[in-house]
Image (cartoon, helix red, strand yellow):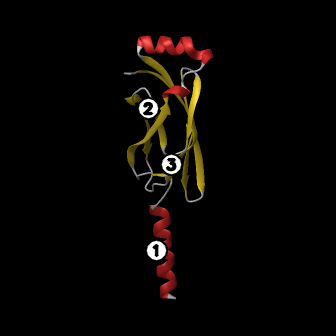
Amino acid sequence: MKKSIVFILVICSLVFNCTVKEKPQFIGIDNIKVLDSNSENITFSADAEFSNPNNVGGTLQTDALKVLVNNREVATFTSKEFKVPSKDKFKIPLTVSIATDSIINKGNLSGLLGSLLSKKLKVQYIGDIKYKIFGYASTYTINKTEDVKIKL
């Protein structure tokens, strides 16, 4: 009898102390930049920023996040699961390497030449980031565009 009462008290303590008040707050995508650029590849990075008010963490994962350069889809990627810290602000790195020739096409040549002359590219991240914890799931929709400077 005593063991069952202790067991119930432990379970109740865990349930009430590890609460999920709300899903982590998506603050935004920032810090889109070119990490590396050469004649073969351009590597872009961005940070997805969140704030978790909960006592428990969970996981976040990107699902078919698309990268567009000058309004042309050049890459789609999915990340591994990222562990969410409890009661903390955190960032998820979103990094993708794109072959330079995938940006070039005959219909977009004038736009690319203009970008090369101005040394700027319009980079857009579009897709979803999924949050999961204890069987609960939620989705954040991402749509962020920024002009970034390039060095070739």
What residue would you read off at disc 1? Answer: 10
Give the labeled residue for mark 2.
Answer: 44
Q: Nearer the viewer, mark 1 or mark 3?
A: 3
Among the two numbered marks 2 and 1 on one chain, the one whose residue lies closer to the N terminus: 1
Task: Say whether residue 141 is visible.
Answer: no
Q: Residue drawn 42% across and 11% down? A: 118
In this view, the mark in front (2 or 1):
2
Amino acid on which the number 3 mark rests in the picture: Leu
Judging from the image, what secondary structure is the residue with disc 1 in? helix
Could you tell me if the residues under marks 2 and 3 are in contact, i.e. CB atoms within 8 Å? no
Label 2 element class? strand
Q: Please tell me which of labels 1 and 3 falls first in the chain.
A: 1
- The answer to which quarter of the image holds residue 55 is bottom left
Q: Quadrant of residue 50?
A: top left
Q: Nearer the viewer, residue 52 or 7?
A: 52
Pinpoint residue 41: horizontal percent, then vertical percent. 45, 31
What type is the residue that disc 2 sits on?
Phe
Residue type marked 1: Val
* Residue 37 position in % (x across, y down): 39, 28
CA gap, disc 2 to disc 1? 48 Å
